[in-house]
């Protein structure tokens, strides 16, 4: 029993995957670094999102993580083994534990769903019966039991991505790497696929690392987030911390995408970036797990005598933390606007300035 417990402890305290000082350049002299000293780690069973603009180096990083690309310097330790030093044979074995899905589902059009998912198993020496069991089992988990004999062309985008996920996991993969895996899907289907991944993470304990340019995907799926900019991780932490208190301009820019979705359309068109006296300033207030429980809005209205116009709001949950926002507008006055923002941030409310508006 003791031995079992201590093994469990060791497992949980050992990072599952560690990227250590990864640098990668495709140029001859190594001057242009696509990845520049990237380090992070993830424990088993967690979900990590890596976000960055197009060209930030996300796909290259993901390819390094499954050994498809060799970094120039640095180590990738997967379950304690350095992927960058393994022999090709050993690397192939390790990679069976790592499933990958992409934006384009890469299914074979001439094969049925069943045959597509069987593909990775054909390299293993399994009996037909064992193969069938594994494939049926995983297709059941992704909700496609009724489509075994369908061809990819007969499936919706979401169903195709489910097939790709089943194929990635069928060889008992414990790590799933996803590259822009929702970019070809509409918002509703995206949400369904995100729910599926969450379900697989919870039920099978699969560790997930995904890269995306879409901050919504990070918000919905990730527990931790790394912001990748020009090949460097510029911000890293739990999603609720990074999102409610972004430190870097690039993170704020990415987050403004979320903010845009929150504003009514008419407002998006009327916002301007320079505030004049008598304009209203539009603020997004972000409440996270650290936010003070003081009635801050009531204080502003009653004690500060500031009329506040509530435009929209939404409360959400990320893990156990409540994560919510309120979009408000209030009279802009140079100086006092800054004081209000300071008052709110002092009470751990994240504040983003969306712009200025003149109510007609
Ligand atoms: N095989 C390659 N050869 C040369 N340059 C590459 C190669 N792969 C990626 N790059 C360059 O590396 C940079 C980052 O690319 P990528 O990792 O695909 O970014 P992202 O996925 O964030 O859009 C880009 O400037 C791209 O042109
Ligand atoms: Mg990419």
Image (cartoon, rainbow, N blue to C red):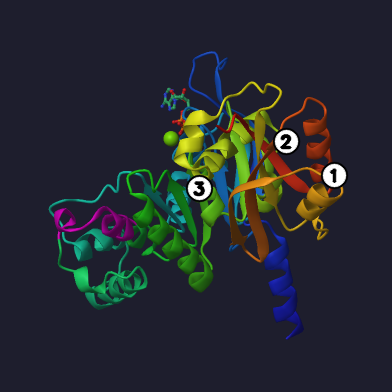
Q: Is-magenta flag for residue 161?
A: yes
279 or 73: nearer the viewer:
279
In the picture, the quarter occupied by the N terminus is: bottom right
Q: Quadrant of residue 231?
A: top right
Say whether residue 324 is left or right of residue 194. right
Separation of disc 2 and disc 1 at Cα?
28 Å
Residue denoted by label 1: 304
Q: In the rendered structure, which segment of residues is drawn in magenta?
A: 151-164
Q: Residues within 10 Å of mark 2 (few under 14, many from 20)?
A: few
- In the rendered image, the residue lying farthest to the right is 303
Counting from the top left corner in percent of width and height, residue 156 is at 23, 56
Q: Residues within 10 Å of mark 1 (few under 14, many from 20)?
A: few
- In the rendered image, the residue lying farthest to the front is 360
Q: Secondary structure at mark 2?
A: loop
Counting from the top left corner in percent of width and height, residue 258 is at 54, 43
Q: First in sequence: mark 2 or mark 3? A: 3
211 vs 25: above or below: below
- Residue 245 visible in the current orientation: no
Is the stretch drawn in magenta largely helix, strand or loop?
Answer: helix
Q: Nearer the viewer, mark 2 or mark 1?
A: 1
Q: Which mark is residue 216?
A: 3
201 or 98: nearer the viewer:
201
Q: First in sequence: mark 1 or mark 3? A: 3
Query: Which residue is pictured at 42% across the width and 64% down the height?
Result: 196
Contact (Cβ within 8 Å) of mark 1 with mark 3: no
Say whether residue 331 is left or right of residue 91. right
Q: Secondary structure at mark 1?
A: loop
Q: Is mark 2 within 8 Å of ligand 1?
A: no
Q: First in sequence: mark 2 or mark 1? A: 2
Residue denoted by label 2: 247
């Amino acid at each position: 029993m003791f031995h079992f417990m201590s093994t469990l402890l060791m497992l949980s305290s050992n990072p599952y995957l560690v990227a250590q000082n990864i640098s990668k350049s495709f140029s001859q002299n190594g001057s242009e670094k696509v990845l520049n000293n990237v380090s992070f780690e993830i424990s088993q069973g967690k979900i990590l999102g890596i976000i960055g603009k197009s060209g930030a180096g996300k796909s290259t990083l993901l390819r390094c993580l499954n050994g498809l690309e060799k970094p120039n310097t640095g180590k990738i330790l997967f379950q304690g083994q350095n992927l960058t030093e393994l022999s090709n044979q050993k690397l192939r074995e390790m990679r069976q534990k790592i499933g990958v899905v992409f934006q384009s589902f890469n299914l074979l059009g001439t094969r049925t769903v069943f045959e597509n998912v069987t593909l990775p198993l054909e390299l293993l020496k399994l009996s037909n019966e064992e193969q069938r069991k594994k494939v049926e089992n995983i297709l059941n988990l992704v909700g496609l039991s009724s489509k075994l004999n369908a061809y990819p062309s007969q499936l919706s985008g979401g169903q195709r991505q489910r097939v790709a996920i089943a194929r990635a996991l069928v060889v008992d993969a414990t790590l799933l790497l996803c590259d822009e895996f929702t970019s070809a899907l509409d918002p509703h289907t995206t949400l369904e696929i995100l729910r599926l991944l969450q379900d697989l993470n919870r039920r099978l304990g699969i560790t997930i690392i995904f890269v995306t340019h879409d901050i919504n995907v990070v918000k919905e799926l990730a527990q931790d987030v790394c912001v990748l900019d020009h090949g460097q991780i510029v911000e890293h932490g739990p999603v609720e911390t990074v999102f409610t208190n972004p430190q870097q301009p690039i993170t704020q820019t990415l987050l403004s995408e979320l903010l845009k979705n929150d504003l009514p359309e008419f407002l998006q068109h009327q916002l301007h970036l320079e505030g004049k006296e008598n304009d209203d300033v539009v603020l997004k207030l972000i409440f996270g797990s650290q936010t003070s429980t003081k009635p801050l809005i009531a204080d502003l209205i009653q004690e500060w005598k500031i009329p506040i116009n509530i435009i929209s709001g939404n409360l959400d949950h990320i893990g156990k933390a409540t994560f919510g926002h309120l979009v408000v507008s209030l009279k802009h006055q140079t100086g006092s606007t800054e004081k209000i923002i300071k008052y709110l941030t002092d009470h751990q409310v994240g504040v983003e300035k969306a712009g200025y508006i003149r109510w007609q």
